Image (tube, rainbow, N blue to C red):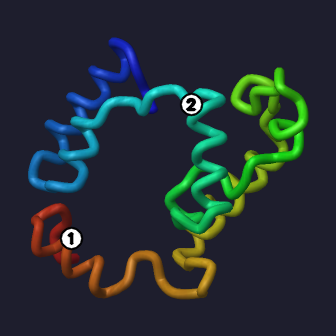
Amino acid sequence: MWSGVDGKTLRTAYGAEFRRDEQVRSWALKQAPPKRTKTSSIASGKRVEAGEADIKVEAYRAVDIFTRYLWYHDKNRHVLYDSAHQYANVLKQMMNGIKNRTKKDKLHFNNAIRNFELKQGTYTSA
């Protein structure tokens, strides 16, 4: 998420542009989440392992073997992102947007969404 002066300017612009959309307006007011710590990451993995939290809402599925056995290992600082993998995911998402389909082969911009946009006055019927 954008932070600092640029982020504040961008969020203000979004809030003004989408002032009639309650959801986007609420997103414009949000701040960047705090940085993860080693302690919070381990706690997240342990909650999922213990069945106390759902995998979909937690950042980690488990506590990895490196964290368990290497006291100095901090996955937040020592793990590198796979840029090629991220790039491939972005391309897949773009292609799904272009073809107007989801993974389940349903329309992204279906009649329900179109009717909602028309009702809000975002688009006019053409």
User: Which quarter of the figure is the N terminus placed in?
Assistant: top left
Tell me if label 1 and label 2 are in contact, CB under 8 Å: no
Label 1 or label 2, whichever lies nearer to me, is 2
Q: Which residue is mark 2?
A: 36
Q: Is residue 38 above or below residue 52?
A: above
| Residue plotted at (37% across, 14% down) | 4
Q: Is residue 57 above or below residue 100?
A: above
Disc number placed over residue 117 in the picture, else none: 1
| Residue plotted at (78% across, 36% down) | 81
Query: Mark 1: few, some, or many residues within 10 Å (few <14, many ≥20)?
Result: some
Q: x%, y% of residue 24?
A: 24, 50
| Residue plotted at (18% across, 41% down) | 17
**Closest to the observer, 76 or 122:** 76
Q: Amino acid at mark 2?
A: Arg
Q: CA distance from mark 1 to mark 2?
A: 37 Å
User: Which quarter of the figure is the C terminus placed in?
Assistant: bottom left
Q: Secondary structure at mark 1?
A: helix
**Closest to the observer, 89 or 68:** 68
Residue 13 relative to residue 72: left or right: left
**Closest to the observer, 103 or 114:** 103
**Closest to the observer, 58 or 122:** 58
Q: Amino acid at mark 1?
A: Glu
| Lower sequence index among marks 1 and 2 | 2
Residue 4 relative to residue 65: left or right: left
Q: Secondary structure at mark 2?
A: loop
| Residue plotted at (65% across, 65% down) | 95
Q: x%, y% of residue 80?
A: 81, 31
